[in-house]
Image (tube, rainbow, N blue to C red):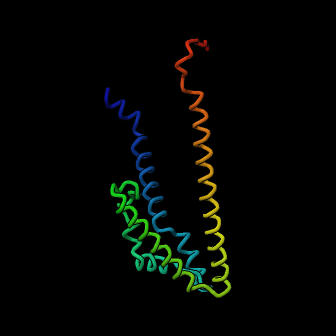
Amino acid sequence: MKVREVIRHKWVVPVAALVLVLAIGAGAWAATGSNEASQDNSTASNGAVTTEERLALGADLGLGELFGPGHVRGLRGMGNPEQAEQMRERMQRRVEAMLDLLRDKMSPEDQATFDNLMAQREAQQEALKKALEELRSTNQKLRDLIDKYLVPEESSTSTTSL
């Protein structure tokens, strides 16, 4: 009886093997980034940063230790707020250093555009922070108003039916 059950499901092994091969192939393709590598190598002659330069830049800045395999926990999961703040500051310095290195490779026109975009970004971030503070204030006022009517009054003895 068991032989018949196995024979009925003999298609499972080849399908599972095919799924495994496709999964491994997709993982390898994603890890190598074959499209990105060909695009980077084709634009290397016009002054663009190649994949090798990106990797070297990341290694110089110590980004491998930050974004390497097995290092997926976030700043909130660190436990110690001082340690999280130090990590945030270190990450910010690394990003700034990386942007400075990239800016040095740019043409003067691109540097001017980069500086304008960075100034625009900072202004937008400040506007966003102000809007977020206003939103928090409005939400708090709204919660206070809702709580005023959600809290049952103790002097009221009448019941309402739903």
Q: Residue 69: horizontal and vertical position, in percent?
A: 37, 63
Q: Residue 121: horizontal and vertical position, in percent?
A: 63, 68
The number of callouts visible is 0
Q: Is residue 23 left or right of residue 48?
A: left
Residue 94 versus residue 83 in the image, above or below? below
Q: Quadrant of residue 159?
A: top right
Q: Residue 24: horizontal and vertical position, in percent?
A: 42, 57
Q: Quadrant of residue 67?
A: bottom left
Q: Quadrant of residue 141?
A: top right
Q: Is residue 51 left or right of residue 133?
A: left
Q: Residue 114: horizontal and vertical position, in percent?
A: 63, 78
Query: Which residue is at 39% across, 58% downward?
Result: 72
Question: Which residue is at the far left?
Answer: 2
Query: Which residue is at 61% across, 12% downward?
Result: 161
Residue 132 versus residue 160 in the image, above or below? below
Of residue 99 and residue 105, the one placed in the foreground of this image is 99
Query: Which residue is at 56% across, 32% downward?
Result: 147
Which corner quadrant holds the C terminus? top right
Of residue 47 and residue 34, the one placed in the foreground of this image is 47
Which corner quadrant holds the N terminus? top left
